[in-house]
Amino acid sequence: MAHDEQEGSVTLKEILKFMLQANASDLHLKVGSPPVLRVNGALQPLGKQVISNDHLKTFTSQVLSERQQKILLETRELDCALSIAGLGRFRCNVYYQRGTPSFAIRAIPVGIKGIHELNLPPTVEAVSMRPRGLVLVTGVTGSGKSTTLAAMIQHINLHKRMKIVTVEDPIEFLFRDQLSIISQREIGADTHTFASALKHILRQDPDVIMVGEIRDTETMETAIKAADTGHLVLSTLHTTDAPTTINRIISFFPPYQHDQMRSLIANNLVGIISMRLIPTADGEGRVPACEILVSTEAVREHIADHAKLPMIPTLLQEGHLQYGMQTFDQALMKLYRDGTIRFEDALFHSTNPNEFALRVKGIEATSDTKWTQLTG
């Protein structure tokens, strides 16, 4: 990092410039440590100059409005979007640790990549074109949920005449109207909460509703009801796979509502796309591995019946050719067989490592087509 020897001379814009040059996805700033970048999923320090409390106080006053600074002082944490002239847009979380401000900043790619550009399966494209229902993109933080959701919205924007309303915290990707009309609403600036925005959203004549993240029962209930009234609703959850996602939706509600919610989910769920980003074999980037659940008659039956829910992974395995479904391990196997990822990384990210290793070694029943069809 430039000006290592000159305390106080470094600027946030300079650090962000180095972040982009390193093709880093995230930047972490805290008192007493040098800036830390996340490049292809791995953390690495940027230079040796330690960030001081004065640095971070200066950064806070430079990038946050007076209203945002007031919210930060009151709540001790803040989500916001930054637009830096000559660099681009960033998603920023400012929080306090040990009494001092810290930054976690994520670079928002310039432009919106298409579904094929992101190496997502064709099923993602098909799911985004459904006329109604609930679509959930899930995964841990940094697994590509927001980027995938943006690609799906842009696909609709380019191919259908729709009224699309998004509710985001903060707004990340900026959409321009193509065939569709898109209204983007930001928590804090345009509305107070996800729940309050969704209460009024049906009066805004939407065809498609995108909720940046479902965080509470009220938002989940309203999203399901919007899907039930004929809208396409897209959102994200911090869950790891399709079965866990279904259980997570149900857990938002008290036990006496579980049977009712299973029925609503079964009737309105279009699909679940669960994401994991895997380092590429050449070490130059990451590629998504996706578990995809598509709502079929059998899937709906298994969701509605609590006793059958554990059998959904079998439906995922068997539904590849006919419905475009796949498990994580099937996705990883294809990426490995194509030479896109290394065996060690595929094994590390697999759901069933022992079974995956056996499949790679060729120890599989000749009658088992769940893998051979997928990998050719």
Image (cartoon, rainbow, N blue to C red):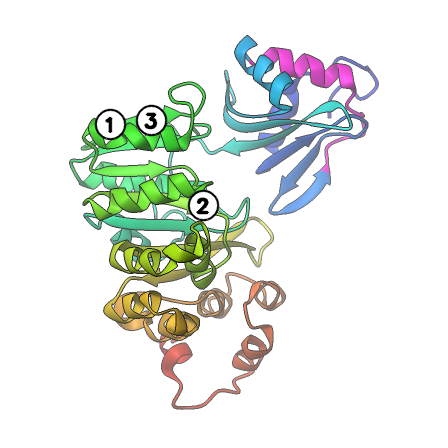
Q: CA distance from mark 2 to mark 3?
A: 18 Å
The quarter holding residue 24 reads top right
Along the horizontal axis of the image, is 195 left or right of 282? left
Residue 166: percent from left, percent from top: 33, 32
Q: Nearer the viewer, residue 75 or 123?
A: 75
Residue 177's label in the rendered image is 1
Q: Which residues lie in the magenta part? A: 45-64
Residue underneath mark 3: 184
Q: Position of residue 225 (x, y in %)?
A: 27, 44
Give the residue at mark 2: 145
Task: Judge by depth and name the residue closer to the eye, 214 or 100.
Answer: 214
Element class at badge 1: loop
Q: Nearer the viewer, mark 1 or mark 2?
A: 2
Q: Position of residue 9 (x, y in %)?
A: 75, 13
**Neighbour tally class for label 3: few under 14, some 14-19, many 20 plus, Cα within 10 Å:** some
In the rendered image, the residue lying farthest to the right is 5
Position above or below: 252 against 298 = above
Q: Give the alpha-carbon distance from disc 3 to disc 1, as whole Å.
A: 11 Å
Q: Pointer 3 and pointer 1: residues touching (CB < 8 Å)?
A: no
Q: What's the amino acid at mark 1?
A: Asp
Q: Are marks 1 and 2 in contact (CB under 8 Å)?
A: no
Q: Look at 42% across and 50% down and name the residue there.
A: 253
Q: Quadrant of residue 103?
A: top right
Query: Tag 3: residue type?
Result: Gln
